[in-house]
């Protein structure tokens, strides 16, 4: 005997959706009763974009005047963000000041070490005078 397997899922086309079904789905999504994904699964709608198009067509949200970015922040939210930014910048400033202080101390320490080495070993580590010109470079300058 052959068993015929039937599936409960029926592939639907755009023409199958009645206006009442579209309005019902739009109402459910806008009221927050269900999400677009749950409506897709419940009613057998293939595309997420289909429901979005219905929301644009039949919904209450003004899609034409929608800003491309999120909603504007309230002044309190903006103040909180700016305060957080100030705290971050103050931390960065303190860190950089500490690094500059350490660099200054290292510079002083290295200068002291060079001075000590010059005194102990009687070696000129720092350049104190201009180097003498080589004979070939002196001849070339005279020709010019």
Image: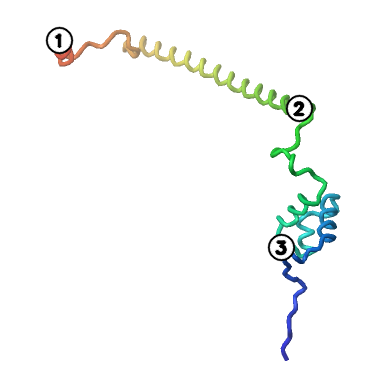
- Residue 142's disc number: 1
Q: Quadrant of residue 4?
A: bottom right
Left or right: where 106 falls relative to 26: left
Q: Quadrant of residue 80?
A: top right
Q: Which residue corresponds to mark 2?
A: 80
Residue in front for this viewpoint, 115 or 4? 4
Indicate the position of residue 124 as horizontal and vertical percent values: 32, 11
Disc 2 residue crowd, few under 14, some 14–19, many 20+, Cα 10 Å: few
Q: Secondary structure at mark 2?
A: helix
Quadrant containing the N terminus is bottom right
Q: Which residue corresponds to mark 3?
A: 46
What residue is rendered at 75% in x and 71% in y? 9
Disc 3 residue crowd, few under 14, some 14–19, many 20+, Cα 10 Å: some
How many labels sit on residues? Answer: 3
What residue is rendered at 84% in x and 50% in y? 32
Indicate the position of residue 73 as horizontal and vertical percent values: 76, 32
Indicate the position of residue 87 as horizontal and vertical percent values: 69, 24
Q: Quadrant of residue 41?
A: bottom right
């Amino acid at each position: 005997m052959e068993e015929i397997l039937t599936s409960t899922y029926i592939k639907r086309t755009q023409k199958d959706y009645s206006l009442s079904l579209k309005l019902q789905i739009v109402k459910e999504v806008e009221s927050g009763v269900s999400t677009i994904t749950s409506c897709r699964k419940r009613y057998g709608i293939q595309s997420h974009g289909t429901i979005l198009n219905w929301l644009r067509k039949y919904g209450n949200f003004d899609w034409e005047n929608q800003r491309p970015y999120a909603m504007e922040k309230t002044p309190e939210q903006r103040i909180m963000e700016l305060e957080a930014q100030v705290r971050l910048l103050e931390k960065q400033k303190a860190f950089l000041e500490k690094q500059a202080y350490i660099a200054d101390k290292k510079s002083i320490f290295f200068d002291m070490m060079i001075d000590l080495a010059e005194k102990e070993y009687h070696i000129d580590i720092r350049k104190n005078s201009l180097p003498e010109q080589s004979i070939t470079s002196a001849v070339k300058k005279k020709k010019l």
